[in-house]
């Protein structure tokens, strides 16, 4: 390695050390890392094929839904919600207003993937379901979306431990996918209320956008995002008919300015470009602050030591009386949308854990679940954000994907549809990267800069994730006379924070009562239901146990009569008839047989009748005993050793 | 196909459905089994027959469903006659058999002037006896499956992770039980 070789620097500042989260390295060193990331996980090959198909489709100017489907019309695209298996029913309840709205809008193309249809996470016996597995189970294959089979807009409800980010990335190539996950049931209810209120006529925002571009001193990464992303976007947005743009750049992008922007009256569309805060795995600040936006207040790499709270804007900084209802935000920042448990960036060996678990960023969660009316969607990064999102080697600034996305948003496209440009870019880059890696595999020499660039660009494009319902859109005033932004009533839902359910495979048995259920006052009825069902099961068990006790012998009697109508059956015996043959077979093998006689000989005909009846009774006894033995053990406590 | 044959066929089908409900609802000891085997996904019509979450509040109807299930179980057990009586007449001769769940079976046959006539009656009557036994065995198996499904649903309904799924299974079981009660009634 040459000492004069230029170093690549990476986005993300470690809050604990104040240093870059990933140390700068040469392109050569970085390309070796890339070569170690040739897809090897199950499903990667199929996913690459899908990306290639997507790339082919995009080059033919088709979009994700099949031809003839207007992505602006939910009645054509459909809408679906995907829960994890074992999802908390209180979450469903809390989202009911939103689900009801979408059901009405999408009509017959509305789907709930819940219960047996839900997403199946990893268990001790199997891997988490891939996108291909999920779609196959629901009758869909690769290619353009047929909304009659699986809707184009799909909302994932659940944390990334239950439904992995990977599934979201994969599904997003073909469909328009968003995700929500909140820490409390009240937050789910608040988000649902915001979306429903926004789409049922109370919201008409002015056509105002804000571009918040941080450029920290002596920091190449933010200087580049400021100059090549934020500034060009701000200038371009200002040329869009009817739009006004707050350009918060050139050193103005402080924490106080951002807080003020959100507190006074947030724009309909907010774009930020900055470093995202990173913390070491397990750092107590990680869950709350990772992905927070590092503002202009950071003096740059010369600053020594832990980053103070005053330098960054996190979920806790969104004021209780912030006016953000209806805003759609896009954060270009490391971990802005969420953090995977395992890094995508592995120097050697298996990818290292960078967090105790995968989780969504607290800032988007707080923005979406604001109780006085929340943002409708936040677009951000899972994992690190990279400069190649907007800068290409020797080609300079590349902002068309951002512009096209924003353009679609302003034209009334749902956010999931607007983001198709990012998905198309991901497909293009993946296809190019896989070709380059195949070349390397067959001995070709590939420029390490090119490979590094392709790899980072691929991961970068893949990692844009939508937090929120993919069918939401900017609710703009049409006649340039916007109404005042309303304030929604604070949703009063008491109770402890709702912790996400652990993966099903880790649950050893019925867990203790869920506080979320207590909040909804349903736990008593659920307990009562369980007790009633157990009671009914025990009654069946008792019935079977009784059968088991009494079926231990077979007793067959055969009578004859000249006047059969006079023969009466009482307590196992026919009166008014002549008993001619009897067989009693006990469970211990003892058998008593009385053989019929006629004229001093065995009455063969009658004996055959009796014997045949005995055979059938014995066969029945065997079956009944087997059934009883199998069932009683689980139905009657204490009767297990049959 | 005779009435007994069709009864038996319907009951075997119902038993299969109830076992499927049980399997879908059943939590395992080590964790929670998937609702369906990954390699053999459930038939979609089966899932749809759950009528799952067609209402907006899946919990609101839970109590009512359970009440109806418990009532159906009581009804079912009450309708299962302890004895089954079957009678066959042929060529002026009659055979009657009473079968008890306890394992007792008593038959009375007309005295026959001809062994040929007796043989014809015996063949027909014993075939009926066999079908009756098969029906009763299948009833017992179906009832055992109901019990097992009730246990599975009770465990799952007490678990917040699986309660929605359990309630869907409960609704499916309720419908199956209604058919089982009707079958028991028809068999008496």
Image (cartoon, rainbow, N blue to C red):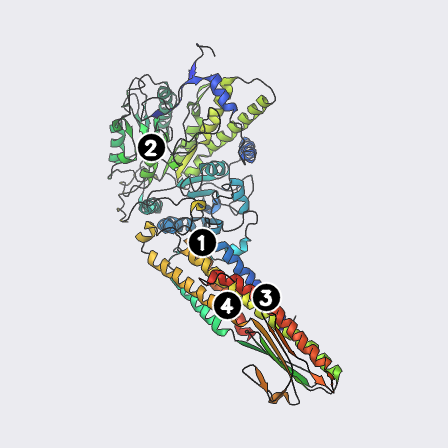
Q: Name the residue under label 4.
A: A544
User: Residue A11, how many percent across, how many down?
Assistant: 38, 24
Taking depth in this image into account, of A197 and A1 the one nearest to the observer is A1
In the displayed structure image, the side of residue B17 where residue B131 appears, left or right: right
Chain of residue at mark 3: A
Residue A623 numbered mark, or none: 3
| CB within 8 Å, label 1 to label 4 | no
Residue A507 is tagged as none
Q: Can residue B92 be seen in this view?
A: yes
The residue tagged with tag 1: helix, strand or loop? Answer: helix
Query: What residue is pinned by disc 1?
Result: B165
Which residue is the site of mark 2?
A286
Q: Where is residue A259 in the image (x, y as percent from the top left)?
A: 26, 32
Return the residue nearer the eye: A194 or A314: A314
Q: Nearer the viewer, residue B15 or A231?
A: B15
Q: Which chain carries label 4?
A: A
Q: Position of B23 compared to A407: left or right?
A: right
Q: Is residue A148 toward the left or the right of residue A418 in the image?
A: right
- Is B33 situated above or below A456? below
Of label 3 and label 4, which has the lower sequence position? Answer: 4
Compare marks 4 and 2 and give the one earlier in the sequence: 2
Whether pointer 3 and pointer 4 mark residues with C-beta atoms closer than 8 Å, the reply is no
Number of the front mark, 1 or 4:
4
Q: Position of residue A78 (x, y in %)?
A: 47, 46
Looking at this view, is A89 or B33 the one in front? B33
The chain letter for the residue carrying disc 1 is B
Specify few, some or many for label 3: CA neighbours under 10 Å numbering under 14, 14-19, or 20 or more. some
């Amino acid at each position: 390695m040459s000492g004069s070789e230029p170093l690549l620097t990476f986005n993300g500042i470690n809050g604990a050390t104040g240093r870059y989260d990933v140390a700068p390295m040469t392109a050569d060193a970085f390309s070796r890392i890339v070569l170690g990331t040739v897809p090897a996980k199950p499903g990667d090959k199929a996913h690459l094929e899908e990306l290639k198909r997507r790339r082919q489709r995009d080059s033919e100017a088709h979009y994700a839904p099949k031809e003839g489907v207007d992505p602006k019309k939910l009645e054509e695209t459909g809408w679906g919600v995907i829960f994890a298996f074992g999802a908390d029913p209180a979450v469903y309840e809390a989202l009911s207003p939103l689900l009801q709205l979408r059901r009405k809008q999408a009509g017959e193309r509305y789907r709930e993937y819940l219960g047996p249809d839900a997403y199946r996470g990893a268990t001790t016996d199997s891997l988490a379901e891939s996108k291909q597995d999920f779609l196959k189970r629901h009758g869909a294959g690769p290619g353009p979306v047929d909304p009659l089979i699986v809707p184009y807009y799909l909302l994932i409800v659940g944390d990334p431990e239950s439904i992995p980010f990977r599934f979201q990335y994969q599904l997003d190539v073909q469909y328009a996918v968003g995700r929500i996950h909140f820490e409390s049931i009240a937050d789910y209810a608040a988000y649902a209320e915001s979306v429903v209120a926004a789409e049922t006529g109370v919201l008409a925002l002015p056509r105002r956008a804000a571009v918040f571009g941080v450029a920290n001193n002596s920091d190449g990464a933010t200087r580049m995002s400021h100059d090549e992303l934020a500034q060009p976007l701000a200038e371009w947005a200002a040329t869009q008919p009817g739009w006004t743009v707050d350009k918060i750049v050139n050193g103005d992008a402080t924490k106080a300015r951002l807080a003020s922007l959100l507190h006074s009256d947030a724009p309909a569309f907010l774009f930020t470009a900055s470093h995202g805060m990173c913390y070491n795995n397990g750092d107590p600040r990680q869950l709350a602050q990772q992905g927070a936006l590092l503002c202009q207040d950071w003096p740059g790499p010369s600053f020594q030591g832990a980053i103070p709270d005053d330098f960054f804007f996190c979920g806790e900084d969104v004021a209780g009386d912030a006016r953000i209802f209806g805003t759609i935000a896009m954060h270009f920042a490391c971990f802005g949308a969420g953090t995977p448990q395992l890094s995508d960036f592995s120097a050697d060996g298996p990818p290292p854990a960078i967090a105790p678990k995968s989780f969504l960023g607290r800032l988007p969660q707080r923005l979406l679940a604001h109780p006085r009316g929340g943002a409708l969607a936040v677009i951000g990064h899972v994992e690190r954000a990279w400069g190649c999102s907007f800068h290409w080697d020797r080609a300079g600034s590349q902002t068309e994907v951002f512009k096209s996305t924003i353009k679609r948003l302003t034209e009334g496209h749902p956010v999931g549809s607007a983001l198709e440009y990012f998905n198309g870019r991901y497909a293009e880059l993946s296809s190019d990267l896989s070709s380059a890696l195949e070349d390397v595999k067959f001995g070709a020499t590939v420029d390490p800069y090119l490979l590094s660039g392709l790899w980072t660009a691929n991961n970068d494009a893949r990692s844009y994730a939508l937090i929120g319902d993919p069918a939401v859109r900017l609710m703009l005033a049409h006649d340039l006379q916007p109404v005042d932004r309303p304030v929604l009533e604070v949703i009063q839902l008491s109770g402890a924070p709702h912790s996400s359910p652990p993966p099903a495979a880790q649950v050893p048995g019925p867990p203790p009562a869920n506080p979320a259920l207590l909040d909804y006052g349903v736990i008593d009825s659920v307990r009562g239901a369980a007790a009633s069902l157990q009671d009914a099961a025990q009654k069946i068990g008792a019935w079977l146990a009784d059968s088991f006790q009494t079926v231990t012998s077979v007793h067959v009697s055969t009578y004859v009569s000249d006047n059969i109508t006079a023969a009466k059956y009482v307590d196992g015996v026919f009166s008014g008839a002549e008993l001619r043959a009897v067989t009693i077979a006990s469970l211990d093998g003892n058998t008593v047989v009385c053989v019929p006689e006629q004229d001093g000989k065995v009455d063969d005909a009658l004996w055959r009748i009796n014997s045949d009846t005995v055979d059938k009774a014995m066969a029945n006894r065997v079956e009944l005993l087997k059934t009883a033995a199998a069932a009683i053990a689980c139905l009657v406590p204490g009767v297990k050793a049959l | 196909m005779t009435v007994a044959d069709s009864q038996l066929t319907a009951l075997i089908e119902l038993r299969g459905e109830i076992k499927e409900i049980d399997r879908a609802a059943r939590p395992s000891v080590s964790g929670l089994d998937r609702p369906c085997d990954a390699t053999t996904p459930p038939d979609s019509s089966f899932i749809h027959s759950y009528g799952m979450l067609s209402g907006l509040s899946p919990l609101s109807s839970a109590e009512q469903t359970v009440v109806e299930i418990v009532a159906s179980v009581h009804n079912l057990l009450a309708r299962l006659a302890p004895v089954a009586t079957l009678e066959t007449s042929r060529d002026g001769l009659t055979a009657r058999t009473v079968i008890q769940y306890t394992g007792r079976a008593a038959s009375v046959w007309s005295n026959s002037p001809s062994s040929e006539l007796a043989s014809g009656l015996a063949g027909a009557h014993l075939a009926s006896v066999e079908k009756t036994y098969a029906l009763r065995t299948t009833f017992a198996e179906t009832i055992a499956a109901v019990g097992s499904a009730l246990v599975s649903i009770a465990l799952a309904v007490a678990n917040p992770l699986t309660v929605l799924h359990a309630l869907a299974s409960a609704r499916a079981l309720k419908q199956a039980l209604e058919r089982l009660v009707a079958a028991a009634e028809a068999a008496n």
